[in-house]
Image: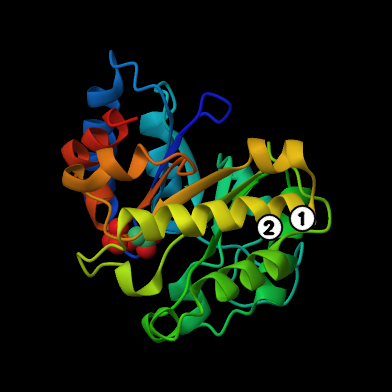
Amino acid sequence: MTQLRRPLIAGNWKMNGLVADGTALANSLTALTEKNDLGCEILVCPPAMIIHTVGSIIKTSIIEIGAQDCHSAISGAHTGDLSAEMIKDAGCSYVILGHSERRTDHGESDKDVKAKTEAALNAGLKVIICIGETESERDQGKALEVVCSQLTNSMPDVINADQLVVAYEPVWAIGTGRIPSLGDVEEVHLALREKLQHISNEDTALRMRILYGGSMKPGNAKELLALKNVDGGLIGGASLNANDFVAIANCC
Ligand code: PGA
């Protein structure tokens, strides 16, 4: 991590939490972060149904709120979907796009992620673009090739480090308790930064935050966040426990 990039600790609550759960978690997070200079930006991304509830609790805290997906269209006949403008209107500042669970469960391609990213940026949201290789791709020695291609094809035409964050999440590390070696994490993050330089410019590549995600916990966060090109974390399971999430943020 470098001072050039303020670390971001983002919680991806996924499809977890009714109003009562979100209320309790938001209250705990607000209390735990109240007098605590965490040295990082902190974000929670609850299910869309409880964004309002969580947002109203954390609004006086340092915690920001985001969504987990958006549609690429501004409005229209898209039953069940949410536009970026609606997400912004609900008080969100961020949206996570291209998570591997969306890519797998909903067949989202890099092209879809790019279109959604353009829509989110147009609505004034910041975007966390997720990429990551599967276990078989890693076993075949294709991890760098896969993530660099996902990065190139998911990025919008205009790449701005103030509006975009990249999250490297090896699919096989998500929710499994397994993480790559620290050397493998740094290798991927460095390759992504070099690729960013290639597709944008040196200044943008240096300022863009690249998060690690996949089984990040209080027990492994310190060493992961100490890596030179790791600028924060995208945390799933451990973000559902306020103490664990804040413990990870404290590792910044
Ligand atoms: P995990 O999920 O921390 O539960 O592995 C991370 C993610 O999917 O963003």
Q: Amino acid at mark 1?
A: His
* Residue corresponding to mark 1: 198
Q: Give the residue at x 42% y 24%.
A: 62
Query: What residue appears at the point 31 percent right and 33 percent down from the top-left corner?
Result: 249
Label 2 Cα neighbours within 10 Å, binned few <14 / some 14-19 / many ≥20 = some
Q: Quadrant of ligand 1?
A: bottom left
Q: Is residue 46 left or right of residue 148?
A: left
Disc assigned to residue 184: none
Residue found at the very far top of the displayed protein:
35
Residue 137, position as x, y percentages in the image = 45, 83
Point out residue 40 in the picture as x, y percentages from the top left corner.
42, 27
Could you classify mark 1 by the number of other residues whose Cα lies within 10 Å: few (under 14), some (14-19), or many (20 or more)? few
Counting every numbered tag in the picture gives 2
Q: Quadrant of residue 77?
A: bottom right
Q: Is residue 226 left or right of residue 219?
A: right
Q: Are marks 2 and 1 in contact (CB under 8 Å)?
A: yes
Which element carries disc 1, helix, strand or loop?
helix
Decide: is 144 above or below 244.
below
Image quadrant containing the C terminus: top left
Residue at the extreme right: 157
Q: Which residue is mark 2?
A: 195
Q: Going 51% across and 28% down the picture, which residue do you hit?
A: 6
* Type of colouring: rainbow
Q: The disc labelled 2 sits on which kind of residue?
A: Lys
- Which of these two is toward me, 113 or 225? 225
Q: Quadrant of residue 27?
A: top left
Question: Is residue 222 in view from this perspective?
Answer: yes
Q: Is residue 72 visible?
A: no
